[in-house]
Image (tube, helix red, strand yellow):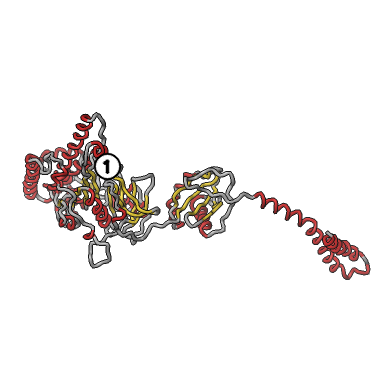
Amino acid sequence: MKEKKDILTIFAILAFGGLGLKGWPQMQEYTALFTLVSAIGWAGLLFVLVGPLIAKKAEEGTDQQPAQAPLFSQEGMVAQENVPTPMVHHPMADKINAFCRQYITKGEAFCYSYTEDENKIEFIISIPNTVSLEDVVAQKNRLERYLGKTVERMEYHPDSMDWVCGFINKGEIPDMVKFTLDHVKSNDALVWVGNGLHGPVYVDFSKFPHSLAGGTTGSGKSVLMNAIAIQIIRRSYAYFVDLKGGVEFAPYRAKGHQVVTNLKDVYKLLRKLERLNDHRMNLFLKYGEEKETTIRNIDTYRKKVGPMERVYVLFDEFSQVVNVMKGEEKDLSEGILTLVKKLGETSRSQGIHLIVSTQKPQKENIPTYIKDNLPVRLAGYCASGGASRTLLDNVMASTELNPKMKGRFILQGTGPEEIFIQTPFIEEDEDKPGPYLHDFLVPPKIQEAALFGGMGAAVPKREEMEEAEEIEEAFEETDVMRQELDLLTQAKLRIADVGIARIDDVQQHLKISRQRCCDLFAQLEEEGWVEAPPTDNKRRGYALLLSDSEREDFIKEYAMYY
């Protein structure tokens, strides 16, 4: 206390003494010096008197500051009584701030709080009244690319709608996942499709009965199909459809599995499965009535009646079914698509599942009425937004996946959001590092006759075989007749049949050069069949000028060629 009084005395002497000496006439030449001494004295007095009050206020404010509260609990967001302490001195917080300035608002939204531990990152974005949670969530994909992290969840903070909380799991999707039987479950409906942020990811075919897989060449689609097929053949019965000569599924054929390689046999197979589907539905009704209970699906049947095998049909390249080249195969193609649609709509409960894959995911190759019945989507990298939309109904497969990251897929349809996964790797070439496909191949679990349970449907009925043969023979004859017509008339037959005028379609159908096809379209334009695209928009293509009634009249005139 005495020291404080001494200090006050010293500064008071400096303050008032300087002023007094400054006023003496004899000291006029030292006025500047005494002014400085007086200023130092007054500054010292202020510091000694006011400084302790300021320090005390600051100390009281620190004591009342709330502790940092976690933004999340393990069960999700929970209300917190204390407001989080602002903490934004972190490079990631700087990135979030930069993102807010660029994409949300110009300086009005900012990173209010940021916390991080070894498992997770939690952050709060403060938003103005003009911005909603939906506005921020709409930028989620862009924010993920900006941060290089996967944002798992974004929602309002429970204490304020001026704050949007984000949660990032620091786990990473592995760059390589080797196939192993350790992840194969005994449940024949669960199929391991890869590893995500939280470990192995499974598709439950008892809930999501059919799937569509696709991606550009080299994305890893064939490897994924092998990983799926290996699991299926160990627990269920599988049919393989490969219209490229059976090359893709040759190892399975060598082990005794059925590999179908032409449209006629695909049609027969699907008719066979259609009868199996109907037979199982009748069994469910029959045993349900006998046991006075309800049997709704294969799982209930197994519990209350007895064993029943699941059946999977794996299509290697579905576009080969849709884009038939020969006229005589058109009816077979349409019949196959009709059966695929029916099985897609009705076979879930009966344990018959379709797994369709394609490396040409264009809407022309996967008709909408087929795609709508394939709820699970597995999309590898797609070179275009259109291909991605065909698989996922969005462009994520073309914008969110790295084309150099083989085996990285997006899983859609098993939950509210897409899941990024690394699919299991398995090698067919024994000269490269394993694991190897041949090490996991096994013969069929049961014989096909046992699959049909004595219903006599293992072999198609004679009349159905004759029907398929008649279709093929009729179209072979029609094709020969068409060859006798000139190319221009054949082009008209094709255009009238499909209702569109596309150079690529006609060229493929007639198997002629592009220049020859362009010449045919020039003739069609002269005859008033088509209208050429405008010179400033060649991509629009030719427009068909025939009305529906004129097309029908032409088809009737040439009915014998259809």
Q: Is residue 556 left or right of residue 188?
A: left
Residue 93, compared with residue 307, is above or below; it is: below
Q: Tag 1: residue type? A: Asn
State how many labels appear: 1
Residue 532, image x and y in percent?
A: 24, 49
Which one is nearer the viewer's eye here, 303 or 144? Answer: 303
Label 1 sits on residue:
373
Q: Quadrant of the N terminus?
A: bottom right
Q: Is residue 20 left or right of residue 415?
A: right
Residue 345, image x and y in percent?
A: 24, 39
Residue 259, image x and y in percent?
A: 16, 52
Extreme bottom residue here? 29
Which one is nearer the viewer's eye here, 548 or 280? Answer: 280
Q: Quadrant of the C terminus?
A: top left
Residue 354, image x and y in percent?
A: 23, 46
Residue 269, compared with residue 88, is above or below; it is: above
Q: Quadrant of residue 161?
A: top right
Residue 408, compared with residue 341, is above or below; it is: below
Pointer 1: residues within 10 angstroms few (<14), some, or many (20+)? many
Q: Is residue 67 left or right of residue 423?
A: right
Identify the secondary structure beneath mark 1.
Answer: loop
Which one is nearer the viewer's eye here, 25 or 512? Answer: 25
Residue found at x 20% / y 35%: 281
Q: Is residue 492 visible?
A: no
Q: Is residue 370 visible?
A: yes
